Amino acid sequence: MPTIEVNSLTRDFNGHRCVDGISFTVEAGEIFGFLGPNGAGKTTTLRMLTGQLRPTSGKARVAGFDVVTEREALKPHIGVVFEFQNVYERLTAWDNLTFTARLYGVPKNRIEQVLEQVGLAERSREPVKKFSNGMKQRLLIARALLPEPKVLFLDEPTRGLDPHMARGIREIVSTLAQAGTTVFLTTHYMDEADRLCKRVAILDLGRIMALDTPSSLKAAHGGAEITLEDIFLKLTGTSLYRDEESVK
Amino acid sequence: MDKTRKFSQSLRIILAITSKDIVDAARNKTILSLLVSALFLSAFFTIMPRLSDTGTPLVFLADAGHSAYTSSISGRGTLRVRRYASVDELKTDFIQRADNQLALVLPADFDQTLAAGGIPEIQAYALNWVSAKILAEKSAEIESRLAAIVGGPVQINLDGGTLYMLPESNGGFLETTGIIIILLTTGMLLVPHLMLEEKRTHTMEALLVSPANGSQIAVSKTLTGMFYVSIFAILVVAANAYLVLQWGLLVSIIVLTILVAVSIGLLLGILIVNRQQLTIITQVLLIPLVVPVLLRIFGDLLPAWLTNIVRWLPPAVMFDLLRSSFSNHVEPAQVLPRLAVLVVSFIILFGISAWLIQRSEH
């Protein structure tokens, strides 16, 4: 049974269709890449799948729960790393995680486990405002992992990080998937999606333009010489053209 | 999930957010500056009534024997005097107007005693909240000024001279206004700041994907607001404790005032999206919150129909109730409807907030 099931999911904002009847499934333990240019509908889809936003139409189930009717029951089974570093900067990493642990009713020894898992154990008593972006990103992942979620949603987790930090984050994500956590990843980095994801969906103007394994997509679009970035640009080029037109 | 488990989970979430907010707010410069401002405001309203008590002493004077000295006492500028034809008139007006002054009743044999070389004993009255130390100082000063006027020593007797304020008296105006303004402004500014902080840092999104729901977040912010406003309430009440005779009533009013203030803040926190909006709206909102208090004092200047409306507005109700707690005589028929106004105000404000939160969740 798939961990994520999406059927004809649609979301309109002020008469504008942001997500247009998308359907896909994600299996347990899979890293699923959700790619698309700015405004393609990635974050809107992620917000619907995490229960933050009600779909205009369509259905979605995550970890066996309907994202609309079973939203409260779904919450303890998902972890979300947002596109912005939304931690309490005046508190220490430990205090941030203690707070999250109390929200979820998670025992305190779990805090030590996740801090070890993301490599922040030694800096956990420092205020988060002293952390680098990479460390804050690790803390966000630690927070998302605290309740041992079945599904981890990552919204551009390596954006703005230096190559060392980005690699560290990718290693954590790989390890999690190997341990059975399903990962739903949105990213702008095609190379990252190519290396990490079992399958990717390329989204443009709210519609899925392609959905397959990176290798199958490459084979279908011209073979070994083609990169995932080439396919992405080919499939989403019209939206870039339309953006230019709208600016004019 | 059974109800008990759901309740304990909800309580755990509310306490987690509240304790986090209390710790985080204590490190937040914006919130700290807000609290320091409230502290200064509190000090101002505590010190101000004492600063106004300088210069020539004011005495309320009744002359039982039509003394020849009365015009000298009134006219020399050594004392400021309000004169009354009878003791009853003196007491009525003194209770209505006095703060920490003395009311004096010259005895019928005042002139004769002085002429015989004796020391006339002047019966004095003071309001219950004036401390023994201040009374002793004031008595000594007035005795000495009177002695200079009449050419011989006089003795002021305060035994049995304690009078109690009525709910409609003017005494304690600055203190009462100060308590209300401090509680209302702190409550209605602190809670929206807590909400705006979560919105600005996007931690609200993280909270909303956690097991916490909008209602639990709102209750937590209310509790954090109540925690900090209660500290201020304790400080301002402690500074003005000498005025209070009805402690039960006072505690009820303070709790209800805090609830109303915090629920105004909660509503603002839900509706407002940035600090600029908050600054503008709170400045506008302060007018309907402060003006009814002022109008209670200057009610004589207003038409009767307007006075009748103003007296039932929540800030005016808080004002009247607080002053009732300074009186030794409280009529339940006066107090209970006013307490009900505050309870209903809180229920309406909190109900609107809860409805807005529920609507946004769906």
Image (spheres, coloured by chain):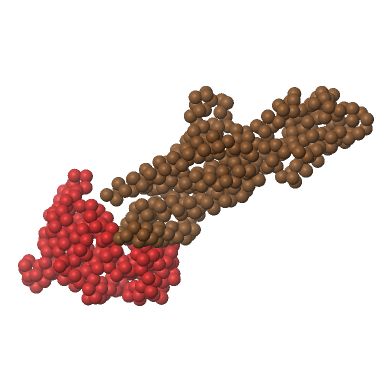
Chain A colour in the picture: red
Instruction: Tell me residue B7's x, y (percent).
Output: 37, 58
**Residue shown at 78%/43% (left/top)?**
B136
Quarter occupied by the N terminus of chain B: bottom left
Identify the image quadrant of residue A125: bottom left
- A102 with respect to B254 (left or right): left
Above or below, comparing residue B262 to residue B72 in the picture: below
Q: Tell me the residue at 46%/54% (across/down).
A: B224
**In this rendering, is residue B333 above or below A20?**
above
Can residue A36 be seen here? The reply is no
Image-quadrant location for residue A164: bottom left
What color does chain B have in the rendering? brown
Note whether A166 is above or below B328 in the view shown: below
The residue drawn where x is 52% and y is 51% is B230
Q: Is residue A160 above or below residue B32?
A: below
The answer to whether A107 appears left or right of B320 in the picture is: left
Query: Is A136 on the left-hand or right-hand side of B257?
Result: left
Could you say where residue B259 lies in the image, as x and y percent from the top left?
47, 46
| Point 68% across, 29% down: residue | B93
A213 to the left or right of B165: left
x and y, in percent, of residue B156 in the image: 81, 37
Query: Which residue is farthest right?
Result: B116
Residue placed most toward the observer, B65 or B101: B65
Please tell me how many numbered marks the rendered image carries.
Answer: 0
Q: Position of residue A168 (x, y in %)?
A: 29, 74
User: Can residue A102 be seen from the camera position used here?
Assistant: yes
